[in-house]
Image: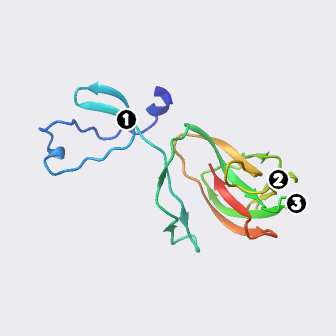
């Protein structure tokens, strides 16, 4: 990342690492995550933060439960985010309908990943987004799926509800993917 990328991040409250600092009195624990980028002065260090990913599940769209512990993954400042589908039975396409989408615009670009046997597609309707695709799986060392996405930069949040999934196989995956 470049200095310009970090200039858009809100500044964190700075605390000098000295004994005179009342915020760091005896018995307190200081926890910081990131990579040291520069030593600004003898008691001030600049850190780059990590990227935290956390998933949530909800049956009603109001009450949410964590899908697990947050995961730290070092990411580029520019990524592709969107919706992917793999039918698991590559010869039989699956269809997923997503609604209540936020964090992405309707300006998606679609691509078949890993040469699935049937071309995928997506379309927006009055109720949301429909994604069609085939492919063996989204897992392991190589994905084979359809991915409708858009380029995103910096921090962002994407939310969507999987309204319906039509597939011949219970191993079908319809996901938000970054």
Callout 2: 10 Å neighbours few (<14), some, many (20+)? some
Numbered disc in front, either 1 or 3: 3
- Circles 1 and 3: CB atoms closer than 8 Å: no
For the residues labelled 2 and 1, the Cα–Cα distance comes to 42 Å
Q: x%, y% of residue 121?
A: 82, 53
Tag 1 or tag 2, which sits nearer the N-term?
A: 1
Tag 3 or tag 1, which sits nearer the N-term?
A: 1
Instruction: Relative to 62, say whether 23 is above or below.
Output: above
For the residues labelled 1 and 3, the Cα–Cα distance comes to 49 Å
Could you tell whether 116 is left or right of 40 in the image?
A: right
Numbered disc in front, either 3 or 2: 3
**Residue 128 picture quarter:** bottom right
Q: Residue furthest bottom?
A: 60
Q: x%, y% of residue 168?
A: 82, 70
Callout 1: 10 Å neighbours few (<14), some, many (20+)? some
Residue for point 80% across, 55% down? 135
Q: x%, y% of residue 33?
A: 37, 43
The label shown at residue 47 is: 1
Residue hosting label 2? 121
SS at circle 2: strand
The label shown at residue 91 is: 3
Tag 2 or tag 3, which sits nearer the N-term?
A: 3
């Amino acid at each position: 990342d470049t200095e310009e990328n970090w200039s858009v991040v809100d500044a964190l409250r700075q605390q000098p690492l000295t004994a005179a600092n009342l915020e760091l009195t005896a018995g307190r624990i200081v926890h910081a995550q990131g990579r040291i980028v520069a030593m600004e002065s003898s008691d001030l260090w600049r850190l780059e933060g990590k990227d935290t990913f956390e998933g949530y599940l909800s049956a009603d769209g109001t009450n949410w439960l964590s899908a697990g512990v947050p995961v730290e993954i070092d990411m580029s400042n520019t990524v592709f985010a969107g919706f992917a589908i793999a039918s698991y039975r590559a010869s039989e396409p699956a269809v997923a309908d997503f609604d209540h989408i936020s964090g992405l615009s309707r300006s998606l670009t679609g691509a078949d990943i890993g040469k699935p046997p049937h071309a995928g597609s997506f379309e927006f309707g009055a109720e949301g987004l429909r994604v069609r695709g085939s492919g063996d799986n989204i897992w392991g060392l190589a994905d084979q799926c359809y991915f409708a996405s858009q380029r995103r930069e910096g921090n962002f949040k994407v939310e969507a509800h999987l309204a319906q999934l039509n597939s011949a196989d219970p191993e079908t995956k319809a996901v938000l993917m970054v």
